[in-house]
Image: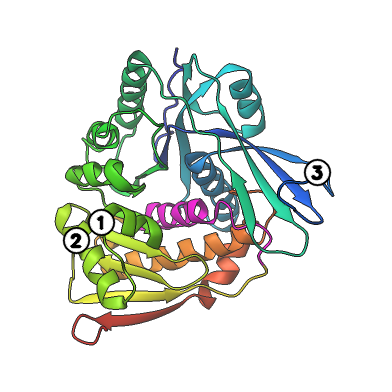
Amino acid sequence: MSSGLIRNQMGRKVTVCVGVTPALQRTLRFSSLVLGDVNRCSAEPLESASGKATNVARVVRLLNHYFADLREDGTTEAVLVEFSGGETGKKYRSLLGFESVYVETKAATRICQTLLVDGEGEATELVEEAINPSEAEWSLFAETLAKQTAAIGDVSQCVGVLTGSPPPGSSPQIYKELLLVASARGLRFIVDSQKTPLSEALEARPWLVKINLQELEKTSFRQCTTEHELRDTSYGLINAGARNVVVTKGKDSVWLFSGDDMSTYYELNPPKVQCRNPIGSGDSMAAGIAFYTSTRSKESLSQLENLVEAVRFGIACGSANAETETPGTVIPSRPFELVNSVTVKVRTVTSGV
């Protein structure tokens, strides 16, 4: 069963967020955490609707509401297309805070838990794997996604985000198939995934691949211990079909490589912030890139400088997320305050290491 179709309003720009593994998220805080012992929470647990695409949609909506107060044009609507099932799916949707386009599954929506320790900036994540939807559910999902993207009038200033790993047991080509359906009319897509699903998806020529260093190494079967290895491996993704590649390394430098100019690449450094919970920072970064891109003029979207600025803003969003306790959320004004603290270094292939 599908929840129905949400159509964008005339003149609105849309960020289509595709989520095949949503989660009911519980965030637990402890004064200390000892494996093999009884650990009691030091604060009331926080429950939220989560999952990578869910986080992206939420952050885009937060940014849009804030941005809309600043100016009358340039705002973007987030549409979340997802699976949902069982009682946990109902609880998830009640916590979501906005209406999504969902395909109901017989399997219940998963539960994931984040463990935080007072005074520490790191998080322990307990991830329940999603159950693979049935073949009929996958078919309905692809059909629903196709209808949703077809409902967008002008895709030139719209962005799609396909993020996360598909459920175990799903087809290795599932992301490629969804991208071909969703991007048939020219919708730009950000893909944040890894391993075989990403390798197969490259055939659909996504606009941007966002990947962290460990995922890049697992996808390419190469160690990237030097800048030269990182650069060559990233260009390998571009040669395989990606138009642009962003590589993250936690709180360290972010690297941007573009197929439009393979003689130049960029090192971007995040601002220093007080980290409360880093979970969801990558999703918030993808949301920032999508939001910035969809609020630009049609004429500027082909300019590499705009992509660099989009990644800068995405980094600011990721940093803003780390300052909050709930994964996949930001104080809407904060990325606009942080973006000028994101530094950019232009590198050339000849000057690279």
Tell me where the magenta segment starts and ends, as one range.
Answer: 275-296
Structure colour scheme? rainbow
Q: Amino acid at mark 3?
A: Val
Question: Quick one: SS at disc 3?
Answer: loop
**Pointer 2 with pointer 1, Cβ within 8 A:** yes
Q: Which of the marked residues, 2 or 1, is nearer the chain's N terminus? A: 1
The residue positioned 68% from the left and 56% from the top of the image is 324
Query: How far is mark 2 from mark 1, CA to CA?
Result: 8 Å
Q: Decide whether residue 289 is among the magenta residues.
A: yes
In the picture provided, is 118 more to the left or to the right than 137? right
Q: Which of the marked residues, 2 or 3, is nearer the chain's N terminus? A: 3
Q: Residues within 10 Å of mark 2 (few under 14, many from 20)?
A: some
Nearer the observer, 20 or 219? 219
Query: How far is mark 2 from mark 3, CA to CA?
Result: 47 Å
Q: Position of residue 345 (x, y in %)?
A: 37, 82
* Visible residue check, residue 19: yes
Q: Position of residue 226 (x, y in %)?
A: 32, 77
The residue positioned 63% from the left and 71% from the top of the image is 273
Q: Amino acid at mark 2?
A: Gly
Residue tagged 3: 38
How many discs appear? 3
Q: Residues within 10 Å of mark 1 (few under 14, many from 20)?
A: some
Residue tagged 1: 220
* Visible residue check, residue 303: no
Q: Decide whether residue 297 is among the magenta residues.
A: no
**Pointer 1 with pointer 3, Cβ within 8 A:** no
